[in-house]
Image (tube, helix red, strand yellow):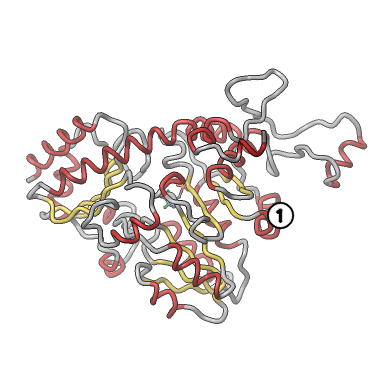
């Protein structure tokens, strides 16, 4: 049985892996909404606390529904072990801080989700951990930024919102050669379209809030890596600081995983079609879409990603005024800073997700007044194209 299970393709893993059935034999995974667990005897409690007997102790440490989510994600990612968290940021923060101490140094790609950038630029230095942010698309910049005390590399790819693609294998090789670890935030790619561990990364993190839930319901996150690193760096931190995922949210995310391949495939197909349509419109200065031949890192996309993206970055010619008029004229596509949802969502990064950056930092990242990020949902592609086309007509 075990050897055959190893050969399951992702869609099968996402329906069946990690399932822990109760004696009732339920079809759908049970929600173990419990804080604690009872022991038959005092001796059994003692044995469980000593680690001599398997079993759950307290839901801050582990919970059966959360365990199913972690195991299913491990199967998909090809990771030995994982810890689920209450949000994506809890996962990112744990992955960055747990393996470091005062005196260590981080090198990170500067195109980061706003809160990831805050953890690296603002929080870590308070505890004596310094950082250097680089343009991650050039491996030479990573090399130059290294110091003898560099212990951690961090990147997102594709990046938010301009969908830059970073060569994960090259950064992983550099990290490994220096005895450092590479943490990859793989949210934009989804676990289906990019496998950072196979590319040599040491730790992968997700905001499960995005495509993994995929239906806009709950927050969640996960850190995946080898068992030794998790035992050494995360185990005690998770037990004692409590970023644990709620069993109810773990259940919602398990249900999300079942449909992840179908949703991501459809959303990616739609996004590719919409990106093609946008490229034909005179109101658009630039369309950035991984999978298009004119993507700035098209060769890296082809090397490390299995498909395109569910996200599109577009630049309107008229700047902020036109970008706002376009957003306000949309009917099917909703204005929201979230992404990976069944509903198509559009956001104006300069005034929302990236408003806290300085003008210079925004310019460095290529975020202007006309820049918009579109997360393509599950609506009919023709309806989306019609909505976008009409909104462009009205905004133009
Ligand atoms: C949303 C997001 C996060 C944070 O996730 P939350 O679940 O909102 O805490 C981190 N990284 C990236 C790339 C994201 O898109």
Note whether 299 is above or below 86 in the view shown.
below
Depth check: 380 or 125 in front?
380
In the rendered image, residue 123, in percent from the top left (x then y), is placed at 51, 65
Answer with the quarter of the image where residue 64 lies: top right
Depth check: 60 or 376 in front?
376
Q: Residues within 10 Å of mark 1 (few under 14, many from 20)?
A: some
Count of number-bearing discs: 1
Query: Helix or strand or loop: what does disc 1 sit on?
Result: helix
In the rendered image, residue 80, in percent from the top left (x then y), is placed at 63, 50
In the rendered image, residue 350, in percent from the top left (x then y), is placed at 27, 56
Answer with the quarter of the image where residue 181 lies: bottom right
Q: Which residue is mark 1?
A: 236
In the rendered image, residue 336, in percent from the top left (x then y), is placed at 31, 41
Q: Residue at x 57, y 58 (%)?
A: 95
> Farthest residue toward the right?
43
Q: Residue at x 27, y 54 (%)?
A: 351
Which quarter of the rendered picture does the N terminus lie within?
top right
Q: Residue at x 70, y 44 (%)?
A: 61
Depth check: 108 or 204 in front?
204
Q: Is residue 376 left or right of residue 100?
A: left
Note whether 135 is above or below 195 in the view shown.
below
Note whether 379 is above or below 75 in the view shown.
above
């Amino acid at each position: 049985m075990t050897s055959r299970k190893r050969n399951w393709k992702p869609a099968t893993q996402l329906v069946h892996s990690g399932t822990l059935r109760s004696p009732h034999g339920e079809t759908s995974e049970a929600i173990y909404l419990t804080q604690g667990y009872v022991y038959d005897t005092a001796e059994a409690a003692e044995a469980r606390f000593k680690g001599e007997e398997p079993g759950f102790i307290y839901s801050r440490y582990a919970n059966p529904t959360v365990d199913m989510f972690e195991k299913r994600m491990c199967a998909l990612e090809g990771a030995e072990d994982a810890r689920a968290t209450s949000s994506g940021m809890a996962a990112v923060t744990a992955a960055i801080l747990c393996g470091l101490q005062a005196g260590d140094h981080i090198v990170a790609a500067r195109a980061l989700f706003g809160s990831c950038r805050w953890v690296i630029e603002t929080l870590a230095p308070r505890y004596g951990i310094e950082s250097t942010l680089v343009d991650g698309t050039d491996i030479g910049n990573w090399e130059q930024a290294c110091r003898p005390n560099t212990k951690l590399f961090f990147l997102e790819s594709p990046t938010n919102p301009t969908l830059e693609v970073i060569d994960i294998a090259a950064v992983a090789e550099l990290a490994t050669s220096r005895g450092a670890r590479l943490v990859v935030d793989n949210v934009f790619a989804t676990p289906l379209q990019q496998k950072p561990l196979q590319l040599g990364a040491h730790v992968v993190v997700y905001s499960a809030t995005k495509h993994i839930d995929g239906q806009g319901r709950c927050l969640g996150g996960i850190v995946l890596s080898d068992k030794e690193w998790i035992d050494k760096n995360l185990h005690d931190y998770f037990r004692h600081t409590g970023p644990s995922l709620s069993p109810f949210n773990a259940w919602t995310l398990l249900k999300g995983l079942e449909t992840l391949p179908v949703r991501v495939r459809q959303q990616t197909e739609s996004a590719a079609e919409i990106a093609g349509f946008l490229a034909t419109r005179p109101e658009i200065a630039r369309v950035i879409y991984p999978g298009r031949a004119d993507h700035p890192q098209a060769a890296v996309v082809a090397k490390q990603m299995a498909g395109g993206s569910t996200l599109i970055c577009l630049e309107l010619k008229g700047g902020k005024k036109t970008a706002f008029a376009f957003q306000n004229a949309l009917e099917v596509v909703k204005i929201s800073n979230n992404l990976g949802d069944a509903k198509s969502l559009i956001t104006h990064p300069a005034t929302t997700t990236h408003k806290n950056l300085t003008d210079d930092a925004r310019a460095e990242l290529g975020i202007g007044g006309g820049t918009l990020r579109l997360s393509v949902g599950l609506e009919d592609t023709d309806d989306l194209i019609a909505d976008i086309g009409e909104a462009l007509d009205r905004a133009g």
